[in-house]
Amino acid sequence: AQSVSQHNHHVILSEAASLELGCNYSYGGTVNLFWYVQYPGQHLQLLLKYFSGDPLVKGIKGFEAEFIKSKFSFNLRKPSVQWSDTAEYFCAVNPPSNTGKLIFGQGTTLQVKP
Amino acid sequence: SAVISQKPSRDICQRGTSLTIQCQVDSQVTMMFWYRQQPGQSLTLIATANQGSEATYESGFVIDKFPISRPNLTFSTLTVSNMSPEDSSIYLCSVVSRSAYEQYFGPGTRLTVT
């Protein structure tokens, strides 16, 4: 079945450590890719998106993601995390059907220790 | 970006009853969606709310259980009918912006069924 997979379910890092969260999808064709973040007690916010062009996209709060078409991947990175990055991170794919709907990965809980 | 409000923000309901959740957007949008986020899980798309016509439901969701209305381009309702404890979830409304094709999420409605 077509899906979105996030490999890390729970990640614990110390402040200043580097972060990489994996995301793979199984849809063929042209897809739009997103990373969302949900801070404790807050609603979902868009971190960054990829539609086309440069496969390395930069988002808010120092996050970036790289689209590797051959690997069907869209991994999220941040060189140095902060305690305030503690949150739930969701990868999402807008499949080629162009209906606007999003298919979400399982989510990754990031806990950053001060 | 779009500003989305949902009512109620939370509710506790008894088994067998129904709850209608409202979603209001501050601007006209073409696409509106309803998602469910069960405890500790990711987001699952329930349906696409179509203006002036019947909603388009995803596999596993039916109109009798989750009737949806969308009378205009800024408002939609989702009803959770004949509730059971398994319906305890956060229900989120989302919209797609015309200009950037980004999807924005409302704050969610936290439903607990006892």
Image (tube, coloured by chain):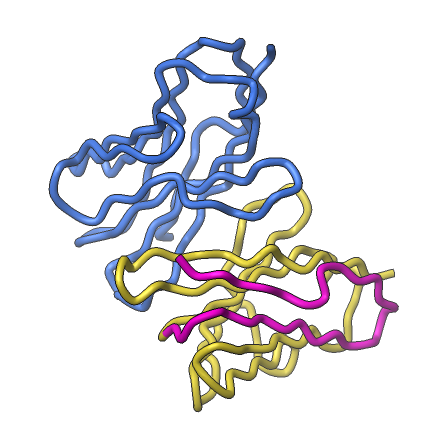
Chain colours: A blue, B yellow
User: In this rendering, is residue B34 above or below A44?
Assistant: below
Q: Nearer the viewer, residue B99 or A104?
A: B99
Give how far across and how far down residue A46 sits, in percent. 41, 45
Q: Nearer the viewer, residue A45 or A22?
A: A45
Label total for image: 0
Which residues fall within the magenta stretch?
B1-29
**As drawn, is A99 to the left or to the right of A82?**
left
* Residue shown at 39% from the left, 57% from the top: B1
* Residue shown at 48% from the left, 62% from the top: B94
* Residue shown at 53% from the left, 9% from the top: A14
**As drawn, is B107 to the left or to the right of B112?**
left
User: In this rendering, is residue A56 above or below A14?
Assistant: below
In the rendered structure, does residue A4 fall within the stretch colored magenta? no
User: In this rendering, is residue A84 above or below B31?
Assistant: above
Residue positioned most to the bottom: B52
Give how far across and how far down residue A26 sits, in percent. 30, 46
Residue B58 seen: no
Residue positioned most to the front: B26
Residue B51 seen: yes
Give how far across and how far down residue A33 sits, in percent. 30, 46
When asked about the image quadrant of residue B84, the answer is bottom right
* Residue shown at 20% from the left, 31% from the top: A56
In the rendered structure, does residue B19 fall within the stretch colored magenta? yes
Give how far across and how far down residue A102 sits, in percent. 39, 56
Q: Nearer the viewer, residue B43 or A50?
A: A50
